[in-house]
Image (cartoon, rainbow, N blue to C red):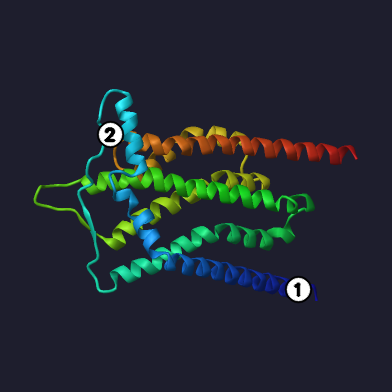
Amino acid sequence: MSEQQNEMSFLNHLEVLRWTLVRSSLAVFAFGIVAFLMKGFIFNDIILAPKDPSFVTYRFLCAFSKFFGTQGLCIDEIPFIVQSRTMAGQFSAHIWTSFAFGFVMAFPYIIWEVWKFLKPALYEKEQKNARSFIIVTSFLFFLGILFGYYVITPLSINFLGSYTVADEVKNNFDLSSYTSLLKASCLSAGFIFELPIIIYFLTKMGLVTPEFLKKYRKYALVMVLILAALITPPDIISQVIVAIPMIALYEVSIKISKFIIKKQEKEKSKTMVK
């Protein structure tokens, strides 16, 4: 009888998970439709904006360069064009880009759905932190998206768009290649910025401790530098710019893990006293 109840309980969980995925997918689809209808704004003012030499990141780098008496970081031209070489190329890019925007805009709702799914397994005190969890998780994700858009994407576009192996070889990039670079840069940065949240839950589960994070800090630094090298152009300045916030996130994660451990020890000591 107990096995049958456990089986039913497991099936009920699967049913709840199914509807969680369905509602999340519908939210992405709904926001994707909104993004689809905003084609002009999304492509002209967002997607293609980092290709313009007057983009805010390039202007900031130029001003930063002039502050030190040089114009080494100033950009006058990004010598490539974006083209579509297939019949359905532009329509396909429009569809998939709209879904990517839909996912980004629906992210807080998706996190809320995930929280509702996990809620029965949490303590009452933890259930009360739903609003804080959704706000912090969404904030970190959007902060990562902005970092990917305003830092990683323009650095990558400027380097790859200007890189040539010979004068005879011209850079004419396909639209899908360009949008894939932008989406990968933004979404990967968005998920990387969730590191403190991941460390929070791993610490709560007893899988990670502050001592563990401190012990392997030097290895984490190497991994950060490798990751920065993979998602940025192969120049030191770009890698340092990307690596700094990642290192900061790791240090914040250590503080969070330390806070959780202290809190757990206090609660444990109170329980023992009672």
Residue 40 lies in quadrant: bottom left
Q: Earlier in the sequence, mark 2 or mark 1?
A: 1
Which residue bears the numbered disc 1? 3
Which residue bears the numbered disc 2? 73
The answer to whether 21 is drawn above or below residue 64 in the figure is below
Q: Is residue 162 left or right of residue 99?
A: left
Residue neighbourhood size for the residue with mark 1, other residues' Cα within 10 Å, grouped as few (<14), some (14–19), many (≥20): few
Whether residue 220 is visible, yes or no, is: no
SS at badge 2 = loop
CA distance separating discs 2 and 1: 67 Å
Seen at 80% across and 76% down, the residue is 1
Seen at 89% across and 37% down, the residue is 273
SS at badge 1 = helix
Across and down, in percent, residue 259 comes to 68, 36
Across and down, in percent, residue 67 comes to 33, 25
Q: Is residue 6 left or right of residue 216?
A: right
Q: Report the front residue among 40 and 144.
A: 40
Across and down, in percent, residue 154 comes to 33, 45
The answer to whether 91 is drawn above or below residue 235 in the figure is below
Q: Are marks 2 and 1 in contact (CB under 8 Å)?
A: no
Say the numbered circle drawn on residue 21.
none
Q: Is residue 261 left or right of residue 39?
A: right
Type of residue at label 2?
Answer: Leu
Residue neighbourhood size for the residue with mark 2, other residues' Cα within 10 Å, grouped as few (<14), some (14–19), many (≥20): some
Across and down, in percent, residue 54 comes to 30, 43
The answer to whether 218 is drawn above or below residue 101 in the figure is above
Type of residue at label 1?
Answer: Glu
Seen at 51% across and 50% down, the residue is 142
